[in-house]
Image (spheres, rainbow, N blue to C red):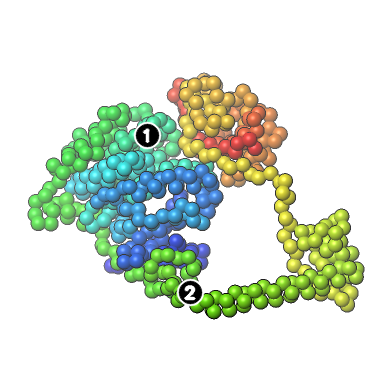
Amino acid sequence: MDTSGEAFPPLQADDPVVVGGYRLAARLGAGGMGRVYLSHTRGGRPVAIKVVRSELADDPAFRRRFRREIAAARRVRGAYTAELIDADPESEPPWLATLYVPGPSLADAVAERGPLPVPAVLRLMAGVAEALQAIHEAGIVHRDLKPSNVLLATDGPRVIDFGVSQATDATSFTATGAAMGTPVFMAPEQASGSTITPATDVFALGQTAAFAALGEPLYGDGPLPAVLYRIVHSAPDLSLLPEELRPLFARCLAADPTERATVADIVQWCAERVDQEGPDGGAGSFAWREIRGSELTVPAPLAPSTGLLPPTATHWPYAPPPAEPMSARARVALVAGALAAVTSLALLGGLAWSALGSVGSHGTTAAGSQRLGSGASGTGAGATGSVSGPGSGSGSVGDAVEAPPRPSPTAPATPLPIAEPLQSLDATNSLDLGDQDVRKDRKGDIRFTCGAQKCSLESRSSVLLLRYAKPGATYDSCKFEVRDATSHSLPLAAVAAGSEICARDRAGNIALLVVQVKSTAMPDVGFLMTDVTVWPHA
């Protein structure tokens, strides 16, 4: 059965037609970063166009990270990665394009067909490890490897979203309060906010492959704090996995990053055990075809349609053809025509303004005469109100369109936010809003404390306020809500994942803390993981 219609739903009314010169053919999906569309290169190769959500694009910190990570991702080349081929971080909105992989994600394949057989798991681990090898050699740590970021192509897995995962998550946290990726696939050092290294991706590979073999996360489900606590403080139950795979999983899932297998070790270990008998690659190849499902028919490139495209489109076949060279005489005529048009518009505008002015000056309405004159209640077009209304005299010209009020040149601008995602506060560190970073001592202004009776955030000088309003706090809402706040202590009993805390210190820094994880059941090892956004010197 051909499921192409389900895999490639048509564009909807709120979808763009063209992005960066690529004409969009269908929707592919959506995520925390934005929407993904199908398009094609000049030669007809299908590509996936990811368009960033507007609220992320408005964050300067996101733009900086997006720009930096795109530059790094361009260096990655590998047989098991979906290559980044084009991007524009300066566009409105920003976007990137990767080669399209016509196959399901590992998450979808397991959901539809159940756990993978051992030969397919071996092939999966070898391919993903080889992809990570290419990513790490380019100086990048993926940070968000999980089943939905592994696509199953006909010739093996493809790892996607490398190099930009940090940019996506760093802002989507603070903008929406959503959890980072899928936390159940984090490594212990990532869940606790410690240093991230290539070994972090190895742990995530072990978790991802275990999901493929079991059909469920190795550390189980349940409340997020409980799952993260198990990842940080307990060893996984490897007895659930097929016996022949346990030695490799034990090395991938070691708590100490220095004791984990390298990606080269994983490739070699799997290659030695994959069944290579038979002309088609043996049992491993057969199992791979089985779990992938039926082949999808990718829609062909759309025919050029220059009438729908912006004049700056640059990617064939969607860019309009170059114009013929214009003669000197034609250029002179064109300029003369343009000047004549501008002059005519100016004359018409002057006549219209004279007509409106005469209505106001003859007292058709008192309000109108003030708003169009230079009286105290308004000046010129910058004032509000209509020129005339119902009941006007015979000289009325009807209701005039109001000109929008001009912002005051002295009105303060909103400070640029500084976003620091997934900051971990515990009994050993503290937070200063002026530095936006967590200190490795208790000398900072905001500290996490957890005793036998209660856990709380304490501050020497910052006021702290737990929001109970609708989620999605902004600079304006936080500034308004803390204006009368006086408390320097915030009990955490009512705080949960997604809670928003506004703060203001003596220097005028305004901050929004979006809680991701609260672990206070065991006070001795309690911690709070939160995204921090600071508007400095507000």
Dot 2 alpha-carbon crowd within 10 angstroms: few under 14, some 14 to 19, many 20 or more: few
Amino acid type shown at disc 2: Gly
The residue at 43%/72% (across/down) is: 322
Q: Could you tell me which quadrant the C terminus lies in?
A: top right
The residue at 15%/46% (across/down) is: 274
Looking at this view, is 515 or 382 the one in front?
Answer: 382
Left or right: 159 in relation to 402? left
Dot 1 alpha-carbon crowd within 10 angstroms: few under 14, some 14 to 19, many 20 or more: some
Tell me how far mark 1 sits from mark 2, CA to CA: 49 Å
Q: Is residue 458 shown above or below 75?
A: above
Position in image of residue 318 (x %, y %): 41, 69
Residue at image mark 2 = 307
Amino acid type shown at disc 1: Ile
Looking at this view, is 290 or 197 the one in front?
Answer: 197
Task: Name the residue furthest left.
Answer: 278
- State the SS at label 1: loop
Position in image of residue 507 (x %, y %): 64, 30
Q: Quadrant of residue 192?
A: top left
Position in image of residue 82 (x %, y %): 31, 53
Tell me the mark number nearer the camera, choosing from 1 and 2. 2
Mark sitting on residue 196: 1
Position in image of residue 450 (x %, y %): 52, 23
Task: Name the residue furthest front.
Answer: 328
Mark sitting on residue 266: none
The residue at 17%/55% (across/down) is: 286
